Amino acid sequence: MVDRHPVLLLTGLLLSAPVAAQSPDNAINLAPLNPDGLGPSFFTYEPDERYYPDKETFWLSPSEWVIRQQSVRSRQVHSLGLWADQTLSGSRRAVPDNESYLRVGFATQSETGELAKMEPEARFRLDLPTVEEKLRLVIESDSEENLPLSERQRDRQLTSETRTEGDITGALRYLGRLSDTVNLSTDVGIRGGLPLNTFARVRSTGYFKLGQHWLTHIDQRLYYFNQDGWGESTWVAFDRTIGEWDFRAASELRWVHRNREFEFSQIVSGFHRANNRSTFNPRIGILGESQPGWRTTEYFTDLNWRYRLYDDWLYSEVIPAINFRREDSFDSHSSLTLRIEMFFARNFR
């Protein structure tokens, strides 16, 4: 019988063949990669320090408890998405790579030298891709369409105490594609609260290359809420990489029907990954509105230093910011936001 895997056969013969004797000068070290076989030159500390026992500290038990809880709760969040997906689709199969997550954390903000209390934060998304792939159910803790543009653009500066309280939204989403670079999604759903607020929205996103160095991103949204009326937003960004930095100039124009006005923003930002743990994101922005006339309402600059504390689910943020608001006669207003975030997700990106 002809062997269908000649490579495996050749590999087996090589592994089973005896090793030829070699002189000490050109001998090959076949020892496994273990601490005893690596040699003193491999380590940055004394060889005897490899066997020091773990030190019992106050932080050891709480840290191990947090790590265990993250692992268990992440599996529960993922399993909930799979169960709901199978139930709604009527199929025994489910797409395992859903984007459900739970994000919890604590944040505190110091303004002009006054330290605020530590505030808990929580956000979640239950994203259920059915086996049809183009149809999904999305349940979120916040709806961007009902938040002021100025708040969305400064979201990382804010704590839960200073954010607008959002309502849970649930929508049935149909995904489509207009071309290789343009995607389209249509949502029909309900926003929580009393009275219930039904809505429909259409969103298209795309990207295009401009020459050799520039990339353009476009995000267009059109939506209607039966309690708030209709709205529209257009977001355009131009990206370019220079050295180790990614730069972006982004503009957004948003129509708020209940206020009969436009909101606009212009933000220039940079992004730099210093190493596999630390990233820097400086920004300079201008915010404005069209009523009672086209005018600037705020200038701001901030720096987001994000540090990965453990694995891919525990992060810290340090965000110094300076804001110049029209309501304060454009006087400088400084703040420092400190945040710790933990993500519960099976496949977090």
Image (tube, rainbow, N blue to C red):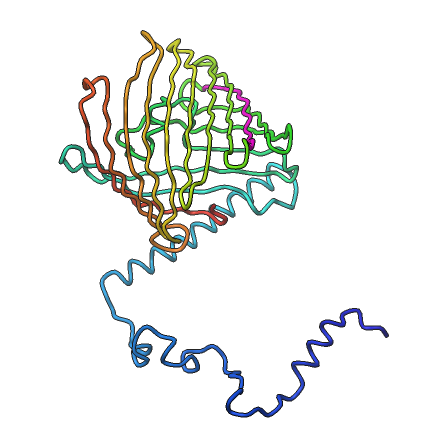
Residue located 61% across and 45% down the image: 94
Is 56 covered by the magenta stretch? no
Q: Is residue 275 left or right of residue 205?
A: left
Q: Is residue 197 left or right of residue 322?
A: right
Residue 136 vertical placement versus 28 (above, below):
above
Residue 273 vertical placement versus 8 (above, below):
above
In the depicted view, which residue is nearer to us: 120 or 209? 209
By secondary structure, the bulk of the magenta-drawn segment is best described as strand
Residue 140, x across and y down, in percent:
45, 33
Residue 204 vertical placement versus 41 (above, below):
above
In the depicted view, which residue is nearer to us: 107 or 297? 297
Residue 117, x across and y down, in percent:
19, 38
In the depicted view, which residue is nearer to us: 78 or 335? 335
Q: Kindly indicate the quadrant of the structure image that contains residue 255.
A: top left
Residue located 22% across and 40% down the image: 118
Query: Which segment did they paint magenta?
Result: 197-209
Residue 72, x across and y down, in percent:
43, 54
Is 200 covered by the magenta stretch? yes
Q: Kindly indicate the quadrant of the structure image that contains residue 45.
A: bottom left
Q: Residue furthest left?
A: 113
Which quadrant holds the N terminus?
Answer: bottom right
Q: Residue furthest top?
A: 292
